Amino acid sequence: MEAGVFKGNPMTNPLAIFEGYQIRRHYDEKVETWYFSVVDTVAALTDSVNARDYWFKMKIRVKSEDGIELSTICRQLKMKAPDGKMRLTDCANVEGLLRIIQSIPSPKAEPIKLWLAKVG
């Protein structure tokens, strides 16, 4: 599936697609802001088998190297997990996600930034 392609109304669809990866998202109507799953974004950027573990280790690395606590730019939102259950997931708005992307060495960093500009 092509980057930025949606099924249904993009304002109500909880999934966005980037290079075949499903990235969960939530639209907060009160502040008119999209929040994206950080773990899903990490998976799309790194092709990691365990994106949750990559995200955990990355938070530790960035804190020790830069002194920045990445968790402070995230919100925990309930999103549907692969097992169908609603689980708390680290999410970030576009600005926060761009900051997180900066900390991931990936050739997909620029393409995903352009994708975020379209879907966010």
Image (tube, grey):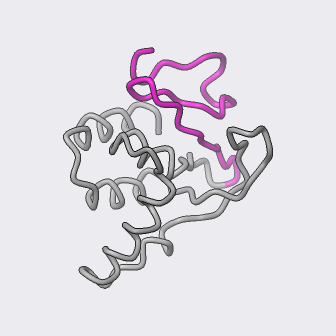
Image location of residue 57, percent across then percent down: 40, 68
Instruction: State whether residue 114 is above or below residue 76.
Output: above
Residue with the most extreme right position: 85
Count of marks placed on residues: 0
Q: In the image, 120: left or right of 81?
A: left
**Would you identify the image quadrant in which residue 77 lies?**
bottom right
Residue 7 is inside the magenta segment: yes
Instruction: State whether residue 62 is above or below residue 113.
Output: below
Residue 25 is inside the magenta segment: yes
Choose between 100 and 62: the one closer to the eye: 62
**Would you identify the image quadrant in which residue 26 lies?**
top right
**Would you identify the image quadrant in which residue 115 lies?**
top left
Q: In the image, 64: left or right of 42?
A: left
Q: Which quadrant is the N terminus positioned in? A: top left
Image location of residue 64, percent across then percent down: 30, 84
* Predominant secondary structure, magenta span: loop
- Kindly identify the residue that appears in the image at 27 percent across and 61 percent down: 103
Image location of residue 24, percent across then percent down: 59, 40
Instruction: State whether residue 114 is above or below residue 4.
Output: below
Image location of residue 60, percent across then percent down: 39, 76
Choose between 42 and 24: the one closer to the eye: 42
User: Which span of residues is magenta-colored?
Assistant: 1-30
Q: In the image, 4: left or right of 25?
A: left
Instruction: State whether residue 75 is above or below residue 66.
Output: above
Residue with the most extreme front position: 49
Q: In the image, 36: left or right of 60?
A: right
- Kindly identify the residue that appears in the image at 64 percent across and 31 percent down: 11
- Kindly identify the residue that appears in the image at 69 percent across and 30 percent down: 12
